[in-house]
Image: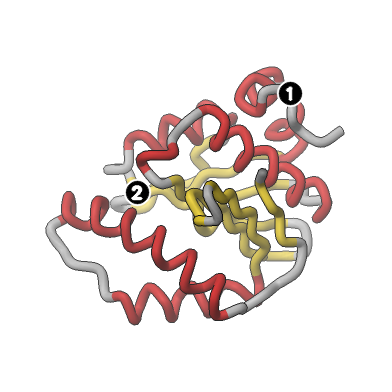
Amino acid sequence: MAHPVGRPLADAHLVDELLELDRVMLRADTAYGGCEPDPAAVRSRLVELLPQSRLCVVRRHAKVVAYGMITTLAPTKWQVSIFTVHPRYRLPGVMRELLAGMAELIEALKLDELCSHVYKTNRAAVRFHRALGFAIREERGDAYDFVVPTAYLLHSPRAQRLLGGAAPH
């Protein structure tokens, strides 16, 4: 079951758990880009984001297998800062759980819109954002800045299908 965290936190154990998943994902992502991630920089960035963010964590066998983080940009405008799922757990149930938990956070925060920054080379993430109804707000060199009104994101027929009817009402 997904566990939305409705308050900022910086629990060291949780940071270690999130970083373990990030290491798996960064190795795959950066190997493609030809560079090696700096673990200290990744930890520092995560610790910096946590106090101004909200999390949704999905666990299997007591291990973090997926998590999403949204970070505040303005009172009712937040950005998806992290959305990651371990490759072995990219299954419909895990995705639905993570999306439903993220939807719960978005609804609780009463957000007007949600933004996301995606590298153009991450074709799967670009397709996923488009499938959820995100539109490109700006194209910047190697990345897209996406935006979506949260009402559409939470209640569109497309979102309902992806969430398996689990969106908040």
Q: Which residue is mark 1?
A: 165
Q: CA distance from mark 2 to mark 1?
A: 29 Å
Are the residues at dot 2 and dot 1 in contact (C-beta closer than 8 Å)?
no
Quarter of the rendering containing residue 26: bottom left
Does 124 sit above or below residue 47? Answer: above
Residue pictured at 62% horizontal, 63% vertical: 71
Q: Which mark is residue 114?
A: none
Quarter of the rendering containing residue 164: top right
Residue pictured at 24% horizontal, 51% vertical: 28
Residue count near mark 2 (Cα–Cα under 10 Å), binned few <14, some 14–19, many ≥20 = some
Which residue type does callout 2 highlight?
Tyr
Query: Depth check: 41 or 79 in front?
Result: 41
Query: Depth check: 6 or 143 in front?
Result: 6
Q: Which mark is residue 119?
A: 2
Helix, strand or loop at mark 1: loop
Image quarter (top left, top right, bottom left or bottom right) of the N terminus: top right
